[in-house]
């Protein structure tokens, strides 16, 4: 019997299910739309005996409609609340998945990430989030943003639970053939559970990226916690190489300069139109239809308050032009000369950063990351630690994340 047999699962509301549940990305525009089949990850979950409980709220359209809507907000369910500190940012776009896992509403939730959408809400809600290498998990029948960057991963309260889920959802899918075939080589024989090792930090070379990532003082409570944890990691046998720098890091972290903005705006229109055209039935069939729907339902969609600026700019794009291809090529070069060169030259098993500050590096390169609860600030707001690596580095990231979690055991449930 599978470890997930009978386990209740909540899915982010952009992950399709061929049942009576809606798949809307938090928008009224897709209410009543019908997918033609279960998404690839849901098919695998059902095969493992998991019970799909329902859909979790999210930042509407995975934060790709509005420039001003707050994290955790979508038209269909309103504002998601951080269960630790009600006024704290829950982050997103997998806000509901992270909130639900943190508040014990489900044992397992799934999120999606293009740039930060698993690791950020996981850190903000004191849960574990795994952003897999792009292609390890199928994106079929998941409302898309970018074929280069989209990935689906587990959000759970422990590393162990997240790894059980990862084992169940990875693998080839004929409906996302190119990416899943390419990434299949990274899946270890016998799965990922064997990497849950208490001594997982021993002998690991971990690079600390400070400049551009540690946006707080070493003397703050958060700063002191990280220094204590680095010290503990060394005691557990890890070799920490401090103050490492990624080439062109300021360019990579600038959404505009890196080319990420140009690429995502063009890819979103192409991919969304393709997704909508495949639906069995839908009130909207294109991005233009969604924009028009929002104009007709301004009140429900809070268009006056939050607008749909990203949609409008995306709709004005003309496919994958030479400018877009150049942007994509630029990101590939930044990744190759940046994190890949650094990790190979320094022979690193992982890089470590706070919260989700590393998300663009992992995002544009399709690299994996695991966020683990790291502590709580003076107000009780959670923060996380993220271990990132190159494609296929999940085994060593799991060893590090699990050993760190077991050595620190900082996570505490939110107060009712």
Image: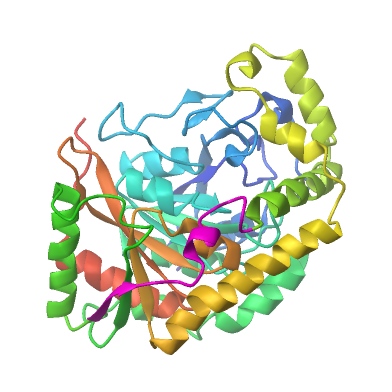
Question: Which of the 4 quarters of the picture holds residue 63?
Answer: top right
Question: Which of the 4 quarters of the picture holds residue 103?
Answer: top left
Q: What x and y, as percent, mark residue 167?
A: 48, 70
Question: Would you say residue 242 sits in the magenta stretch?
Answer: yes
Residue at horizontal 45 percent and vertical 71 percent from the top: 246
Of the 4 image quadrants, the one containing the C terminus is top left
Of the 4 image quadrants, the one containing the N terminus is bottom left
Q: What x and y, as percent, mark residue 269?
A: 79, 44
Front residue of this view, candidates 412 and 61 = 61
> Which color scheme does this rendered protein use?
rainbow
Total numbered badges shown on the rendered structure: 0
Residue at horizontal 68 percent and vertical 30 percent from the top: 309
Give the magenta range. 239-258
Does the rendering let one see residue 72? yes
Residue 168 lies left or right of residue 88; in this view the side is: right
- Rendered position, 232 above or below 146: below
Front residue of this view, candidates 11 and 331 = 331
- Rendered position, 105 above or below 217: above
Question: Which of the 4 quarters of the picture holds residue 302?
Answer: top right
- Rendered position, 79 above or below 112: above
Residue 185 lies left or right of residue 321; in this view the side is: left
Front residue of this view, candidates 222 and 109 = 222
Q: What x and y, as percent, mark residue 321?
A: 86, 56
- Rendered position, 200 above or below 130: below
Furthest-top residue in this view: 299
Q: What x and y, as percent, mark residue 135?
A: 63, 68
Question: Would you say residue 196 sits in the magenta stretch?
Answer: no
Residue at horizontal 26 percent and vertical 31 percent from the top: 85
Does the rendering let one see residue 107? no
């Amino acid at each position: 019997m599978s470890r997930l047999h009978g386990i209740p699962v909540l899915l982010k509301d952009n992950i399709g299910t061929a049942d009576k549940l809606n798949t809307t990305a938090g928008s009224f525009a897709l209410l009543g739309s019908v997918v033609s089949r279960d998404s690839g990850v849901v098919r695998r979950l059902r095969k493992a005996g998991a019970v799909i409980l329902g859909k979790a709220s999210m930042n509407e359209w995975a934060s790709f409609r509005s420039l001003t809507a707050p994290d955790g907000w979508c038209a269909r369910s309103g504002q998601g609340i951080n269960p630790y500190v009600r006024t704290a940012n829950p982050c997103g776009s997998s806000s509901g998945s992270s909130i639900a896992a943190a508040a014990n509403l489900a044992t397992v939730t799934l999120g999606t990430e293009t740039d930060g959408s698993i690791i950020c809400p996981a850190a903000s809600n004191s849960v574990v989030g795994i952003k897999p290498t792009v292609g390890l998990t199928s994106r079929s029948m998941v409302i898309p943003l970018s074929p280069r960057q989209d990935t689906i991963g587990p959000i759970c309260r422990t590393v162990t639970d997240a790894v059980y889920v990862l084992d169940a959802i990875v693998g080839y899918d004929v409906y996302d053939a190119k990416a899943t075939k390419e990434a299949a080589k990274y899946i270890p024989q016998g799965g990922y559970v064997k990497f849950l090792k208490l001594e997982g930090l021993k002998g690991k070379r971990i690079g600390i990226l400070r400049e551009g990532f540690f946006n707080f003082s070493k003397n703050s409570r958060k700063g002191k916690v990280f220094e204590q944890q680095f010290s503990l990691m060394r005691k557990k046998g890890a070799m920490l190489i401090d103050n490492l720098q990624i080439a062109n890091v300021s360019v990579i972290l600038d959404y505009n300069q890196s080319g990420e903005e140009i690429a995502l705006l063009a890819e979103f229109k192409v991919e969304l139109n393709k997704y909508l055209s495949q639906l069995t039935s839908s009130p909207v069939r294109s991005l233009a239809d969604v924009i028009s729907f929002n104009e007709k339902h301004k009140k429900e969609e809070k268009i006056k308050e939050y607008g749909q600026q990203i949609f409008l700019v995306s709709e004005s794009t003309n496919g994958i032009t030479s400018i877009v291809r150049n942007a994509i090529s630029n990101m590939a070069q930044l990744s190759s000369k940046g994190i890949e060169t650094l990790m190979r030259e320094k022979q690193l098993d992982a890089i470590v950063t706070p919260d989700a500050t590393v998300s663009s590096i992992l995002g544009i390169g399709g690299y994996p990351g695991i966020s683990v609860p790291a502590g709580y600030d003076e107000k009780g707001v959670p923060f996380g630690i993220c271990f990132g690596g190159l494609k296929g580095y999940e085994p060593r990231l799991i060893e590090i994340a699990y050993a760190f979690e077991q050595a620190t055991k900082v996570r505490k449930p939110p107060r009712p």
